[in-house]
Image (cartoon, helix red, strand yellow):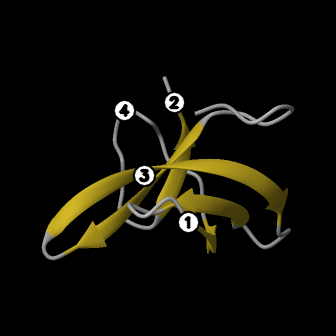
Amino acid sequence: MMYQGKHCLCYTQPLEGALITRAAHYDRDNGDGTHRVFARLDDGSEVPVDVPQCDPAQPTAGCWSELP
């Protein structure tokens, strides 16, 4: 998934004891060490989440990263 003018991102969330990676797009830097991204859910809707950035090689629950 690509958004014009946006990086292709993923957001990793904990779900029932597993880590689920979702497509996301970047919105803004919140200035407090977190960033607003919009994560795409299974039904195609998107939800805003304020989360820190993480290393794409080591996804961590509740973080976002650029796709490698």
How far apart marks 3 and 4 lie (CA) works out to 15 Å
Specify the quadrant of the image occupied by residue 28.
Answer: bottom right
Residue type pointed to by label 3: Arg
Q: How far is the residue under mark 3 from the one under mark 2? A: 11 Å
Residue 53 lies, in percent from the top left, at: 59, 53
Residue at 47% over, 40% down:
55
The crowding category of the residue bearing disc 3, from other C-alpha atoms within 10 Å (few below 14, some 14 to 19, many at least 20), is: some
Left or right of 4 in this view: 8: left
The residue carrying mark 2 is: 67
SS under mark 4? loop
Q: Would you place residue 62 above or below residue 27 in this image?
A: below
Q: In this view, does 59 lie to the left or right of 52?
A: left
Disc 3: which residue: 22
- Marks 1 and 4 sit apart, C-alpha to C-alpha, by 26 Å
Q: Mark 4 points at which residue?
A: 57
Point out the frontmost of discs 1 and 2.
1
Q: Residue 45 carries which label?
A: 1
**Foreground pick, 42 / 49:** 42
N-terminal of the pair, mark 1 or mark 3, is 3
Which amino acid type corresponds to the residue marked 4 in the rendered image?
A: Ala
- 3 vs 2, front mark: 3
